Amino acid sequence: MSLLSVKGLWKGYAGQPVLQGLDLEVPAGSLTAVLGLSGCGKTTLLRVIAGFERAERGTVSLAGRTLDDGATFLAPERRRIGYVPQEGALFPHLSVQDNVGFALTRSERRGKQVARLLEMVGIAPLATRMPNELSGGEQQRVALARALAPRPDALLLDEPFSSLDASLRSRVREEVHGLLRGQGVTTVLVTHDQEEALSLADTVAVLRDGKIVQQGAPADLYEQPSDERLARFLGAVNLVAADFEDGSARTALGRLPVRGERGAIGRAAGLVMIRPEQLEVRVRSEDTHRAGTSAAGLGGRVEQCRYYGHDALLHIRPEHPGPTDMLLARVHGAQALPVGTEVTVAARGPVTPLE
């Protein structure tokens, strides 16, 4: 069941459309990531949901209440929606505890609610500090506690980790994710970081050209993207020519099963998407030594090796032109191969056809 629903949303500025008939469904209690390139309209979407901007057309509803439909417009303070902007936007003249209690009534501020919130986000010892005395991660925790203080029905996060350095960003977002999941807060996170969206969210909606082009579980989007552009946006990919027959694809890398309903494709030829981690790479001399002949697969040569410690990305040039100019294979870090190594490449299915 969707707690937050956006249907047919249009919004632009100075006559230039930004959101163009956008549809978004956010399940109750979920963390839904809206993923898109910088400038694609992610923040505009959040501002319309929060009530900071009015929709030109379309409907925004929360828990069965209409927030904005052209005729009805509920003010931000009546929507029961928490909002954490990109930079936290703390009040510089207020202490941590006063920032968190800002939206509460006087009696609530005098009670234990602020102390409980500070304890919940792990910053209770910082209650009397001022914002300029906090680290970036601490400021984000204060902003989160402030947004949660009024017990909102939904929480909106506008790239809240983007200003943090890489090591701190990873730790803070994991902590925030655990906190939100523990509280069961329905959350919309907008981000341009594919890894962040795929690793944190229960459902991911990709925003492109003013519309959600695909929404679903992270694995569904990664393994079965709706088109080539989305496939490339979500990670490294190999596009290989294929002939389709009886639910399988015959490729230079072998005969491979086709995912789900796409296996019933009624066409003779096309392209399949193969992620780098689906490729199996063997050193050619080892194949020859073991079998006396070349193992099944496509011969090639390692042109580049990008080593990341836990894994490595090999750029392999096939020895015969045809399926692709370059193959990308992700292997364990211990299996990183030097440039110039002669290899045989095969693939593990299933694969996804793409237009």
Image (cartoon, rainbow, N blue to C red):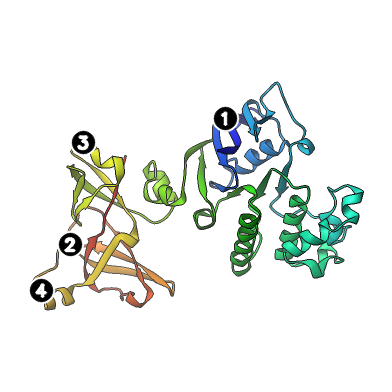
Crowd rating for badge 3 (residues with CA inside 10 Å; few <14, some 14–19, many 20+): few
| Location of residue 319 in the rendering, given as x and y in whole percent from the top left corner | 19, 62
Mark found first going from the N terminus, 2 or 1: 1
Across the whole image, how many numbered discs are drawn on residues? 4
Within 10 Å of the Cα at label 4, are there few (<14), some (14-19), or many (20+) other Cα atoms?
few
Q: Earlier in the sequence, mark 4 or mark 1?
A: 1
Q: Is residue 302 left or right of residue 313?
A: left
| Left or right relative to 154: residue 311 | left
Q: CA distance from mark 4 to mark 1?
A: 60 Å
Crowd rating for badge 1 (residues with CA inside 10 Å; few <14, some 14–19, many 20+): some
Q: Check if mark 3's residue and mark 4's residue have beta carbons within 8 Å.
A: no
Return the residue at label 4.
291
Amino acid type assigned to the residue bearing label 2 in the image: Gly
On the image, the x and y values in percent for residue 252 come to: 18, 55
Secondary structure under tag 3 reads: loop
Quadrant of the frame with the N terminus: top right
**Circle number at residue 297:** 2
In this picture, is 171 found above or below 243?
A: below
Whole-number angstrom distance, CA of label 2 to CA of label 4: 13 Å
Residue 147 seen in the figure: yes
Reply above or below: 207 against 191.
above
Specify whether residue 133 is in view: no
Q: Disc 3 or 2, which lies upstream in sequence? A: 3
What amino acid is found at the position of numbered circle 4 in the picture?
Ala
Q: Which mark is residue 7?
A: 1
Q: Label for residue 267?
A: 3
Label 1's element?
A: strand
How far apart are labels 3 and 2 at the CA level?
Answer: 24 Å
